[in-house]
Amino acid sequence: MSESLFTQLLDLACGAFLLAAVVVLWRRELAAIVRLFALQGLALAAIALLLGLHEDRWDLIVVAAGIGALRAGLLPYLIRRALATLVTDRAQGQDQAAYTHSEEVRETQPLVNVAASLLTAAALTLLAYAVARPLVELDPTPATRALPVGLAVVLIGFFVLVTRRRALAQVVGFLLLDNGITATAFLAASGVPLIVELGVSFDVLLAVLVLQLLTVRVREAFGTTDIDDLRELHD
Amino acid sequence: MSLIPAALATATGLGVAGAAAGLVLPQRVRGAVVGVLTAGVGVAGGASGVAALGGSRWSAEVPGLLPLAGTHFAVDALSGLFMAVAGAVVAAVAVYGVGYVAGHGAHGLGSRGAQAVLPLFALSLLLVPAAASVSTFLLLWELMALTSLLLVLAEHRARPAVREAAVWYAVMTHLGLVLLLAGFMVYAAQAGGETFAALRSGSGAMSPAVRGLVFVLTAVAFSSKAGLVPLHAWLPRAHPEAPSAVSALMSAAMVNLGVYGLVRVGFDLLGGGPAWWWLLAMAMGGLSAVYGILQAAMASDLKRLLAYSTSENMGLVVLGVGAAGLFDHAGNKALAGLALAAALLHVVNHSAFKALLFCAAGSVLRATGERNLDLLGGLRARMPLTTGLFALGALGAVALPPGNGFISEWLLLQSMIHGLAVPGVTTAIVLPVAVAVIALSSGLAAAVFVKALGVGFFARPRAEGAAAARESPLLMLAGMGLLAALCAALALVPGLLGDGLDRAVEAVGYPGTRPVSGGGLQVRLDEVSAVLSPLWVVATLTVALGAVTATVRWAGRRRQRRTRARLWDCGGGAPTPRMAYTATSFAEPLQRVFDDVLAPEQDVDVTPVRESAYLVERVKFRNRVPDRIEHRLYRPVLDFLAAAGQSARRLAGGSVHAYLGYGFFGLVTLLVVLVVGW
C-alpha cells in the first residue's frame, strides 16, 4: 500500500469514526444510536487494520478483527437485546406498534437539546485539536495527525454521558468514550500490544453485561430507565 | 563479598518467608514459625548494621525492581547504627512475641493478617536506613507506615478505641508522608537527580530559600514520625492501643527513623545549614522533652505513660541534633561531633530501655488485663521477674547512674555546657535553656518512673486483676532478658560502642571525638576534659548500697524483740486497698506545680441525702488532664474540616448527571487551561 493511499484511507476511517459519534448526538431513537455505534466500531476496526497493514504487524490485524467482532458485533447485539427486553416488558397486553415509539426507546428529552449538542460537539472537536497540537508536533506522521479525532470522540462520549437521560443511551455514551480512548491509543502509539487490548476489551464486555442487567432491573424496580429519577439513592 | 549485602539479602528472604508463613500456616504453629523468622530478620539486619559500624560500606543499584527510577541502596556507619539498633530490638521482641502470641489464641497479634504483616514491618525497619534514593526511601518508608498501621489495628475487635487510634495514626503518618514527598520533590528537582549521591552533590548550588524550604518540610515530616510536639498526637494513642510487642517495635525502632531522617537530610544531604534551622529543631526538641514528660507524669495508663516518655526522649535526641547543627554553623566541628554522638547514643539507649519497658508493660497487661496504674499494684510478689526487668528498664529511663540513659544524657549535658565556649548571643541564651530543659525533664522522668514502678508493682493489689496476676511464660521473659542484657551492657561498658559511634558521626562529616572509648571502661572527652567510668560508678554504688543495707540489717538485728501488730486505723476499720496511694494521687503534687501548663479539669459532684442537706449521700470527683496542645491546635482544624465536609454535601444532590457533569466540566476546563496556557 502506498503512503498516500494509506493516508487517505486512514483519514476516511477517522472521519467516519468522528462522524458516527456526532450523529449519535443527532438521532433520538435508541435503535438508531446503537446502529451508529456499531458503525463506529467498524471504523475503529478499520483504523486498526490499516495501521497493521501499513506496519506489517500481524498482531495488529488480529486486534483489528477482535475489535470489529466485539464493538461492531457483540456489544451492539447485547444492547439491542436489552432494548428488546424493555420493549416486550412494556408491550405485554398492548399494541406492539404503538409502543415502538414510546419514550422508553427514544431519547425524548435530553438535558441539552439536539442543536446545542451539535454545536457543543463542534466546540469539543476544536478543543481536542487545540489540545493535541503539541502532541502532533512531536512526531508528525499521518497517524498522529489523526490523533485529535480520538480525543474528540472521548469528549463527545463524555458529553453524551452527561446529557442523555435514558440508561441505554448512557451505556452507548460510555462505549463511545471507550472507543475514543482505544482510537487515541492506536493513533498515538501505532497500536497497543495484544494482551493490553485483550484486557481492555474484556473489561468493556463485562461492563456492558453488568450495565445491561442493571438497566433491566432498574426498569423493573422503578418503571423507567430515566436515571434522573434515581436521585433518592444518595446518602 | 562483604557481609552487608549477604545479611540484607538474608533478612529480606526471611522477611518474605515470614510473611508467607504467617499467611499459610495454621494457628497452632504460626506464632512460633513467624517469631523465629522475624528474629532471623532482626539478627541478619542487625549483623549488617554491626558490619557497617565496624567500618565496611556497601552500595548497590538494582535497576529492575522499580519502574522508571530503579532502587538504590547504600549502607554507611550512620545507617548501620540505626540498623543495628532496629535489628537488636526486632530480634529480642520477636522472641518475646512468640510467648505473647501463644496465650492469645487466633485473635489480635496472633491472627493470620497480623502475623503476615509483622515480618514485613520488621524488614522495613531494617531497610529504611539502607535506602539511597528518594523513591526507594519513600517506598520503604510507606511500607513501614502501612505495616505498622495494620499492626496497630490488630486488636480492633477487642476494643473500639483501637480504631480511633488507628485513624489518628493513619492521618498523621500520611500528612507526614505528604510533607516528605513535597520536600523531596523540591529537593530532587533543584538538585537534578533523585539518588542521595545526586542530592548531596546538588545541594551546594541551591539557593538558601530552597534549602530552607526543603529542610523545614522534611524536618517537620520526620518530627511527626519521631513523635515530637506538636505533631505527637498519634503517639500517645497508637502506642497504648497496639499489641505490646508492636508498641515496643514502634517505640524503640520506628520513631528512631525520624531522627535518622533528620540527621541524614539535615547533615549529610544538605550538609548543614544556617542557625535558624537548628534553633527550630532545638525548640521542637526542648518543647517535646518537657511537655512529653509532664504528660507522662500525669498519665495513669501505663502504656500511655511510656508513649509520652518516648516523646520526651526523642525530644532530647533532637535537642542534641539541633545543638550539633548549631555548633557546626558556628564552626566548632569537634563540639558538633560530640553533641551528635551524644544524641545518637541516646537513641541507642532509649531503644534498649523503652523496648524492655513496653515488653514488661505488655506482660503486666497480659497477666492482669489492666493498663491503669490505679488498678494495679502488688505485682512484685506475683511477677517478681517482670518486676525486676521493669525496674531495670526504669533505671535506664530515669537518667541516673547506674542506668544506661544516664551516660548519654550526661554526654548531652557536657556538650551543651561546653558549647557555651562558642561565641554568640544565640548560644549564650539557647544553651543554658537547653541545659535547664534536660535537667528538668530528667528530674521529672525520675518522678514518672518512681510512680510507674512504685504504684504499679509494689504495695498491695488494688483490683482483682492485679491480685490474680501470674508470672509470664518463659519466652516472654527470655525476650525481655535479652533486652535487659543490652541495657546492662550499655550501662556498664558503653565503650564497646565507641568506634562504631565515632564512625557514625564521621559518616556525616564530623571528626569523631571518640566520646566513649578507652577500652570500654571509660567515657573520656578529649576536647573538653571530662571523664566518666561507668563501671566504677556502678561498683561504688553497689558497694555503698550493700554497706547501707548491711548496716540497717545489723542495726535491726540488735533490737531483740520484733512483734507483728495491725496498723493503727483510728478505729475506722482495717485500711482497704482503695485507700492506697494511687498513680493519680502520686502525680497530684506535680499537677499542682504545673497547674498553669497542664490546665487540669476537675469536677466535684456532691449529692446530699434527701432529708438533710448536711448529710452527703454520694460525692463524685473527676480529674482529667487533657492534652492541651492537642486541644488547642487540633480541635479547630478538625472542626473546620468537618464543617467543610458538611457544606460540601450540598454538591452531592443525588443526580447522576450532576456527578458526571462535575467530571466533564473539570476535564474540559483543564483542557482549556492547557490550551490557553501553552
Image (cartoon, grey):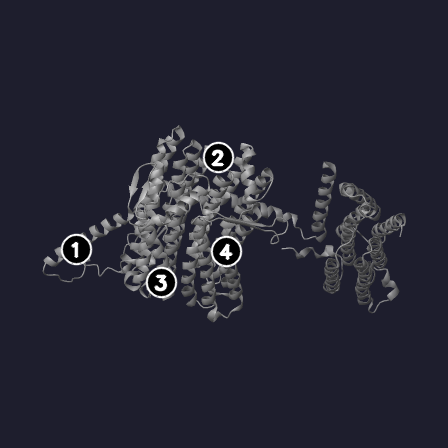
Residue B477 marker: 3
Marker disc for residue B8: 4
Q: Amino acid at mark 2?
A: Gly
Between discs 1 and 3, the one toward the N terminus: 3
What's the residue type where badge 1 is placed?
A: Ala
Chain of the residue on which disc 2 is drawn: B
Q: CA distance from mark 4 to mark 1?
A: 52 Å
Label 4 residue SS: helix
Q: Is residue B622 left or right of residue A98?
A: left
Residue under label 2: B273
Cα gap from disc 2 to disc 4, whole angstroms:
33 Å
What's the amino acid at mark 3?
Answer: Leu
Query: Which sits in the foreground, B639 or B515?
Result: B515
Q: Are marks 2 and 3 in contact (CB under 8 Å)?
A: no
Nearer the observer: mark 2 or 1; the answer is 2
Q: Residues under labels 3 and 4: Cα distance?
A: 28 Å
Nearer to us: label 4 or label 1: 4
**Host chain of mark 3:** B
**Gap between marks 2 and 1, in whole Å?**
57 Å
